[in-house]
Amino acid sequence: MNRRGTDNTLTESIIYLLIFILFFLLMFYFVSANNNGAFYWEDFYAKELALVIDRAEPGMEFAIDVSELSRVAIKKGKNLRDLILIDNINNKVTVSVRPGAGTSFLFFNDVDIVIEQGDGIVLPSGGATTTQFKFKVKERQRDAQV
Amino acid sequence: MLRSKRKLGLCGNRIQLRDAVPYVLRRASHGNWTRNLVQRESYNRRGNLGSGILYSVFFLMMLMIAGGIVGGTYAFFGKGYDFRATEAEFLFSRIQSCFEKNNFFDSGFVEQPELFYEKCALSSEVLEDGEHLVYVKRISDGKEFFAGVYDFTVRCGLDARFKNKGLPLCEPRERRVIGGYEFIVGSSQNSRRTNA
């Protein structure tokens, strides 16, 4: 009989429970992040936008359909104004459909991306199903950020 | 004292091994000698070993569940969007057309890399970020020009490059001479998770 209570069963159980909770939180985060394809669409649009910019010549104008992205962003509670950010200093496209996190990709074309209408996100029909991202490509003018 | 020791069967010995259980003698307040067992984990009298083994089973279960969830997610969403080959392909066509327009080696590109970036309208920060290579070699005199990671000339030939996204994919896919020049243009760039 363990009359003195020297066994540490309670401590072991608590440690085990904590590890188990941590594990399930991690799994929950992983699955919920993949839910709606958030990772996938961020990755896809960041790379495709970088490719479009790499192929672009100064003077070109683009209107890219980002409806799929805005659909996921609305579900995740993300403001559409912060959907796509272009950093001309670091040549970086950042796409974000999750609050506080995003995916970025670098473009090697030495041009400036100019967004003339607010944040570049345009809703032609007034709904998120036809969301477009509009931007212009211009000659490199250093130290400009959009 | 002798009597109490005799009762305990300790005549002549201060410590005696009985039933292979170690103990020490202590004198109690009433003057008699008592035995106190020495606690040793190695005897495993409380089944600690068994309970430890059971923990490994729990961890194994956790690993299996995690593997199932991750595997299922990958099976559904795929391995992601591998962009290295596309980027290398486009960068190569860009370099090739720039090369045709401005003669690389006679325009001072080798001596002045900034001239190369300016003429080809390429970002030096991106090409020198450790994930790209532009390599051109004139076969006739062995003169070389490169920007980025020179080691990609080797890594581009590794068999593991298709599975390992940390390795570069290059264009042309096999080393060959095009019009007296050898080109290797590679990219190992993958998307980065950032705070936004």
Image: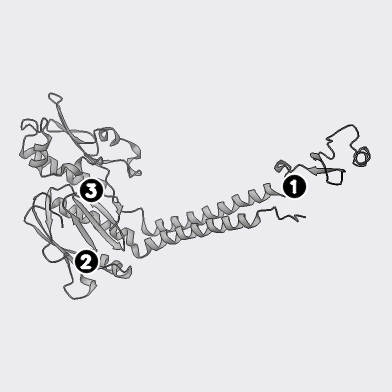
Q: Quadrant of the C terminus of chain A?
A: bottom left
* Inter-mark Cα distance, 1 to 3: 65 Å
Amino acid carrying mark 2 in the image: Arg
Instruction: Please name the residue that numbered disc 1 is placed on.
Output: B45
Q: Amino acid at mark 1?
A: Arg
Q: Nearer the viewer, residue B6 or A55?
A: B6
Instruction: Identify the residue at image location x=13%, y=23%.
Output: B141
The quarter of the picture where the N terminus of chain A appears is bottom right
Q: Are marks 2 and 1 on the same chain?
A: no
Marker disc for residue A81: 2
Which chain hosts label 3?
A: B
Judged left or right of residue B31, residue A73 is: left
**Quick one: A4 or A26, which is closer to the camera?**
A4
Residue furthest out toward the bottom? A126
Q: Which residue is mark 3?
A: B86
Residue A129 in view (yes/no): yes
